Amino acid sequence: MDETKSCTGKILIVDDEATAVENLAHVCRKEGHDVTTRTTGMGALEALEQSHFDLILSDLRMEKVDGMAILKRAKLADPETVVILITGYATLDSAVSAMKAGAFHYIAKPFRLDEVREVVRNALEIHSLKRENRLLKGRLKNSPEGSTIITQDAVMRRLLDMARQVAPTNTNILINGESGTGKELLARYIHDQSNRSDKTFQALNCGALQKELLANELFGHEKGAYTGATESRIGLIEATNGGTLFLDEIAEMSLTMQVKLLRVIQEREVQRLGATKTIPVDIRLIAATHQDLRKEVAAGRFRQDLYYRLDVVGLRLPPLAQRRGDIPLLAYHFLQKHASRMGRLVDDIDPEAMIALLDYDYPGNIRELENIIERGVALARESQLSLTNLPATLSEHAVQAVSEKAGKRLPTLAEREADYIRYVLESCRENRTRAAKVLGIDRVSLWRKLKKYGLEENQESDPVQPRK
């Protein structure tokens, strides 16, 4: 995500107090938003009939048409419209009712303008993500079947253009990229785009087998070639005749095996273990590695002649952290894939969860993203994947990202409690008996908290708006 760019939107501000409207409009316009103001609920409904708004800031208590009516009308017209309600009569019941009706946030008066600014900024960012998520879901739903590479990244598109260009040839290809970036997927994509698409595609991880087992897997053997070889067996090279052979982690292949593979490439023939004759083969070879083969050649661990035979066309897959624009597309792809496989009715990703996904660096790349989404689908209790369904590492990272994005540290729970006690005291005109009752504690407990937070003498640290 581009952290230097903030979301701007079309905002409707509604309050029957002209000063409040003026202050809120001034703050929003300074942020670059397109602002429309109304001083009556009826005026707000008329504005909603005439235009569409991304966000609505509305006072809750107004004559004839109140904030709840505006909220319901806005949500009826467009469920994605963000509504923030403001009131000088904050109660738990009214807050719960507002949130159940679809309010994004509930701000109690007196409020700080910087608080409103931050809430509006976050709300519009989430609104933008919701809209983008809806478009991405539609794009995936309408994408043609058989599409194997999901991307909207410019670097990846150029890479795929080159892959399609060389696919019809018999040229050997070397794919380089970090673990989990989709090297085998790209190899299959090239095979599907080639003239060999109706033939076999075989894949083998060279680092997963010992030298003897790898030789047997690739070249096969004749009956009696070694103890236990009771019958002949063809290897992958022979079985792939006419198709494409993908060798992953090619750098893990021993020097002895490299010599044998080089002969297959040069002579276009294979010899089973224990055989005296060779068998002609026609294969397209695609190799892959996460290592720098040039350094391996310089260190004497990889044959230079084999390197040049493999690296006729080199394709480098970027890590997921360098193609963040693909994260929502891939996340929804994996969401659909695993929800269908598990039989779960999870078809959306909560904006807060998407922000966390976008801000994570993915050391395990696409494979790690898929694992995260699969885990989330398994844990989700609703139709939306939420932040609580993601691993703790992502949640902690998201909190840190929000803190850095805001340019300040996040307040502690104690600081939040102190602020709230100060607000209740101000609202109760410093009547501690009444304040204790509002807080749900006794006077002694309130006195201890006042002493703990240094609030024995109430001090106003910020200018506040008059309470209606």
Image (tube, rainbow, N blue to C red):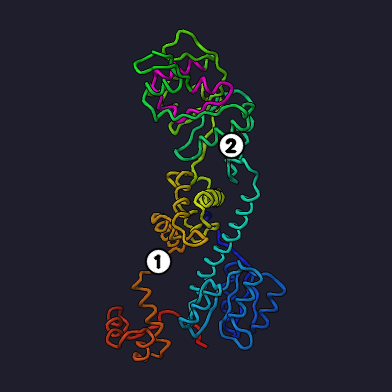
Dot 1 surroundings within 10 Å: few (below 14), some, or many (20 or more)?
some
Which quadrant of the structure image shows residue 169? top right
Left or right side of 182 for 226: left
Mark nearer the N terminus (2 vs 1): 2
Identify the residue shown where x is 51% and y is 19%. 238
User: Looking at the picture, does residue 447 appear above or below residue 184?
Assistant: below
Left or right side of 307 for 127: right
Kindly state the secondary structure of the residue where label 2 is placed.
helix
Identify the residue shown where x is 54% and y is 63%. 126
> What residue did someone put label 2 on?
159
Kindly state the secondary structure of the residue where label 1 is placed.
loop
Question: What's the residue type where badge 1 is placed?
Answer: Leu
Q: Where is residue 145 in the image (x, y as percent from the top left)?
A: 63, 43
| Magenta-span inclusion, residue 259 | yes
**Which of the pair 83/341 is nearer the observer?**
341
Question: What's the residue type where badge 2 is placed?
Answer: Leu
Range drawn in magenta: 236-264
User: Looking at the picture, does residue 158 appear above or below residue 5?
Assistant: above
User: Looking at the picture, does residue 336 appear above or below residue 272?
Assistant: below
Identify the residue shown where x is 55% and y is 17%. 281
Picture disc at residue 410: 1
**Which of the pair 346/341 is nearer the observer?**
341
Q: How far apart are marks 2 and 1 (CA)?
A: 41 Å
